[in-house]
Amino acid sequence: MVIPQALIPTEERRPINKVKLVITITITTLLALGTMGSLVIRVINDGKPAIGDKERLLVGYLSAFTCQKKFGRIKDDKGQAILSGLMKANDIDPVLLRDSLILKTAAIYTQQLDHSCQAVAINEPEEINKIYKSERRRIR
């Protein structure tokens, strides 16, 4: 409840320091804008696909190759030749093979493949995106 000004004795009334009020409002506004801006950016970034189609395809190729190699179904040199051919056929830049985040994503996804090196996940692209996002956040 607000006390009417007439009931406050004149010696207890304090004038409002307008400079302090302006500074306080300015700082509060800037902090609120910064917080809201970061939340909006976070929502926008979470809505975007974490990894491009070609990168996701490469993660799948690398995971399958590593899995096949792990079970002794393919030799390293033959697998490298097949991988190189698949990359050329799908116009995937070989520079992506040096991206540590893609390699780490492929290594983690390899562990989720079954014994026949088939995807266990119902939605493989979504699962690769999820792994990629979590690794990207962990690196930051």
Image: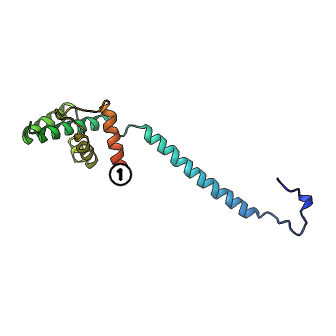
In the rendered structure, the answer to whether residue 108 lies left or right of residue 3 reads left
Q: Quadrant of residue 111?
A: top left
Residue closer to the observer: 123 or 133: 123
In the rendered structure, the answer to whether residue 120 lies left or right of residue 24 reads left
Question: Where is residue 45 drawn, in percent x and y?
Answer: 44, 42
Q: Which amino acid does label 1 sit on?
A: Arg
Secondary structure of residue under mark 1: helix
Residue drawn at x 90%, y 66% is 10
* Crowd rating for badge 1 (residues with CA inside 10 Å; few <14, some 14–19, many 20+): few
Question: Where is residue 23 drawn, in percent x and y?
Answer: 68, 61
Please tell me how many numbered marks the rendered image carries: 1
Question: Where is residue 97 drawn, in percent x and y?
Answer: 21, 44
Above or below, 23 relative to 70: below
Label 1: which residue? 138
In the rendered structure, the answer to whether residue 4 lies left or right of residue 85 reads right
Identify the coloring.
rainbow
Residue at the outermost right position: 6
Question: Where is residue 123 drawn, in percent x and y?
Answer: 32, 30
Q: Quadrant of residue 91?
A: top left
Above or below, 54 relative to 8: above
Residue drawn at x 55%, y 51% is 35
Residue at the outermost bottom position: 11
Residue drawn at x 26%, y 33% is 120
